[in-house]
Image (cartoon, helix red, strand yellow):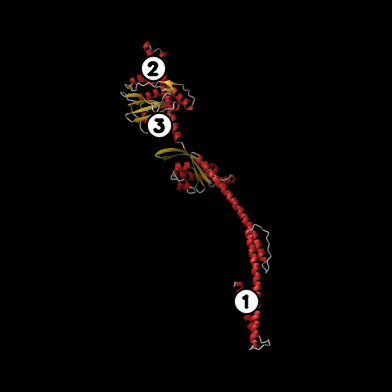
Amino acid sequence: MSFGKWLSLGVGLVAAVLTAVFLFLDPTPPLPIWGNGVSIRIGIAGVFGGLIGLAHWLVMSRFNAELRRLTCHVEVLTKSDVSDLTLEPGMGLAPLALAVEQGMQHLRQRTQKLVSKRRELEIQLRIAEAERRHAEAVLNSIADAVLVTDAFNELALANKAAASVLNFDLGFSRRRPIDEVLDDRALVKLIKDTREGAPSVANLRRHVEHRLTRNGREHVYDVTVAGIGGDAADSEAAAGDGHDALGVVTVIRDVTREREIAEMKSDFVSSVSHELRTPLSSIKAYVEMLVDGEAHDEQTRAEFYNIIQSETNRLSRLIDNILNISRIESGVVRVQREQVSLPSLIREAIDVMLPQARARNIELKDVSAPVFFQVFADKDMVYQATLNLLGNAIKYTPKGGRVTTSIVVDEAARVVRVSVQDTGVGIPPEDVPHLFEKFYRVHQHKKLAQGTGLGLNLVKQIIETVHGGTMTVASEPGKGSSFTYSLPLADNI
């Protein structure tokens, strides 16, 4: 039995009781108080209560039916996009139905606006995310370190180069205060001062030199710090009101190698100037003595001529070295390959360098095996490379020392190896990796002999770049050095 029926039954009972009470208390009806009068009064009360309960049940059933119709209508309005569905329920529920329909229509309109706004926000979010990924891709494609901080001095963007140079975790550092991300207090202060210090966005730009130690070596960085403003109106307002910049972009470029190259070029220019000036001064002096007639006999004139010729050859070799390196690096060198006998070439080079070795009391020794073989190479270039190696060995070997050349043929690898070994001062281990760099000279050896740092670079260019060979060095300070170049054997061997 449903709750509605129980409620109707209760209403009927209440009506019957009230009717019976009324009949017993009202003396007007011509019914006796006792006997059959009691039964009649109770019967009338029961009939009246039953009628009232039935009427209540019928009304409630109709009301519940209309209420169910209204509920179904609301559900249809909730689940359907149709906005012109109408319902006119009875039992006085029409105003409620109208209010519900109007409320649902207003709610639907608001929902549609919110859905449209959400879609716009989703599109803007996707666009912003795509722009952020694009900005990150652009930043990561830049070799220089780049940091972008916002108006709260928090890290907004950074590239991998910045994380590597400044030693921080790129994934966990975004949106964190810059002073918590970076350990470099000077750089943090520079970024903050740039954002807070200038009254105008247009003037928020600084350019400084900064030094950092990485892997035990000091690096020099060129740091550019620039303020970020909003649009033009915001920038003008910020400039007029003295507001801070909205953020700061910091670009950190490693100029260590550039400074080293600049220093090497400066040293090179100085060394070349000295090297050029020395033979030119000698040539000029002896020519002036010849012009002034200070050479009174043929022997003196012959001696002057020999000195002039020697200095001229020295000057020519220096200029040739510079030009040859330039031609090889630019790819315009002319290579005239032919069958070359390396043992004969080595003996010729030794013969040329023998007077220089004897002047320093240095023994030149060739321990090559008497084996006939040839390489397909440019004879003049290989000859020049061998002369440079022999000249270096003699230059850095003390008087009374020894320079030994040897040739080894590796039939299995189809290469021939030529070694020039000396008993000289040797090379410190930290300088060995840089020996073949252009303009490089061992700092400890600069006082032992003059040079431009081009000879070994030219040898490497000739052997490796032009002929596809290999160049190696082994050295021990105080005991000497051994330079070895390898060239492919000729195909007909």
To which residue does mark 3 refer? 434
Give the residue displayed 52% in from the left and 42% down from the top. 137
Q: Please determine whether, in this image, residue 262 is positioned above or below residue 118.
A: above
Q: Indicate which label's residue lies in the foreground, 3 or 1.
A: 1
Tags 2 and 3 touching, CB below 8 Å: no
Could you classify mark 2 by the number of other residues whose Cα lies within 10 Å: few (under 14), some (14-19), or many (20 or more)?
some
The quadrant where residue 132 appears:
top right
Under mark 3, the amino acid is: His
Q: Position of residue 189 (x, y in %)?
A: 46, 45
Q: Indicate which label's residue lies in the foreground, 2 or 3.
A: 3
Distance between the alpha carbons at the discs numbered 2 and 3:
35 Å
Disc ID at residue 97: none
Disc ID at residue 307: 2
Q: Residue furthest top?
A: 297
For the C terminus, the quadrant is top left
To which residue does mark 1 refer? 11
Q: Is residue 225 visible?
A: no
Q: Nearer the viewer, residue 283 or 199?
A: 283
Point out the tag, 3 or 1, that comes first from the N-terminus. 1
The quadrant where residue 67 appears:
bottom right
Under mark 2, the amino acid is: Ile
